[in-house]
Image (cartoon, rainbow, N blue to C red):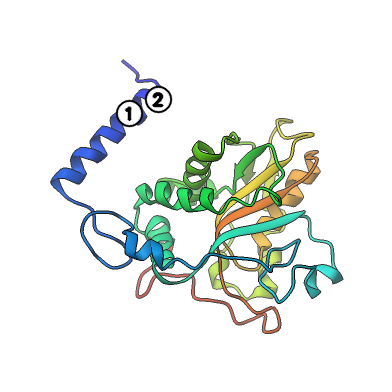
Amino acid sequence: MMAFPHTREKLRSVWRILLDLIFPPRCVGCGRWGSLLCDHCLSAVSWLCPPVCTRCGRPQARSRLCPDCRRSSPPLSAIRSAVIFEGPLRQAILHLKYRGQRELAQPLGTLMARAWPRDAMRGDCLVPVPLHPSRERARGYNQSRLLAEALSEQIGLPVVHGAIRRIRATRPQVYLKARDRRENVKGAFVVDGTSLRGRRPILIDDVCTTGATLAACAEALWTAGAEDVRAYTLARAAWDPARPDILPDLMPRAEGTS
């Protein structure tokens, strides 16, 4: 007999509890036993606090448009992030993304809910940034979808699944210089149907660096008739637009990529 989705989730929760009793989890930040992200490492998280650019969310000296946003008009009304991509939080994201520890989405989603910028995120639904089907099959899940679902449980906005698709298998952005990222994802996303026409979706992703992927998704949403598009990510990677080809290290140490 086929189990209903909520029944399957309850069974998975029970199974996770049993596994935790038999094999206690270890903190991905410091290795302590007891939880995947311990209180000590959570206390070391660097929250991304104002002042930031009022549009792209990049940290700066004053809460106003940054030079890049003054020169051009990005397709997103606002981008915001919860924390800085560093320290234990960096390790947690890499474990979620590259080591199959999807259960980390729950505590990381809680961080996103805690920092939820209500004034900037005026939207009516959450839309996870999609992976290409081949990459999602290889990974087994989409970490952005897991984060969106965890966030949705706590802030009440619904997640719209499957409306936006990645139709081109692009090179991983992590390998590219800043100036090549926008071209790499140009035209890579499409929106199916009319489910987002007239709506105000909020894109959800794990890390924002230059914002190129978010911008490409936003352009597809605008084409499909969205009324407004914003984005919220778990983390913001440190990046200096004055030195655009020097990007932060977004890969696990001494590991392969996906």
x%, y% of residue 144?
A: 52, 49
* Residue 73, above or below 145: below
- Which residue carries the number 1 mark? 10
In 3D space, how far apart are the residues under numbered discs 1 and 2 (Cα atoms)?
6 Å
* Residue 229, above or below 10: below
Assign the N terminus to one quadrant of the image.
top left
Looking at the rendered structure, the kind of residue marked 2 is His
Tell me the crowding category of disc 1: few under 14, some 14 to 19, or many 20 or more residues within 10 angstroms, Cα based.
few
Tell me the crowding category of disc 2: few under 14, some 14 to 19, or many 20 or more residues within 10 angstroms, Cα based.
few
x%, y% of residue 165?
A: 62, 43
* Residue 134, above or below 48: above
Q: Which is more toward the observer, 148 or 216?
A: 148
- Label 2: state its secondary structure: helix
Looking at the rendered structure, the kind of residue marked 1 is Lys
x%, y% of residue 83?
A: 53, 63
* Residue 115, above or below 228: below
Residue at the (65%, 58%) spot, across then down: 80
Residue at the (58%, 36%) spot, across then down: 159
Q: Which mark is residue 6?
A: 2
Q: Residue furthest top?
A: 1
x%, y% of residue 54?
A: 75, 62
Circles 1 and 2: CB distance less than 8 Å?
yes
Residue at the (64%, 52%) spot, across then down: 117
Q: In this rendering, would 148 be left or right of 102?
A: right
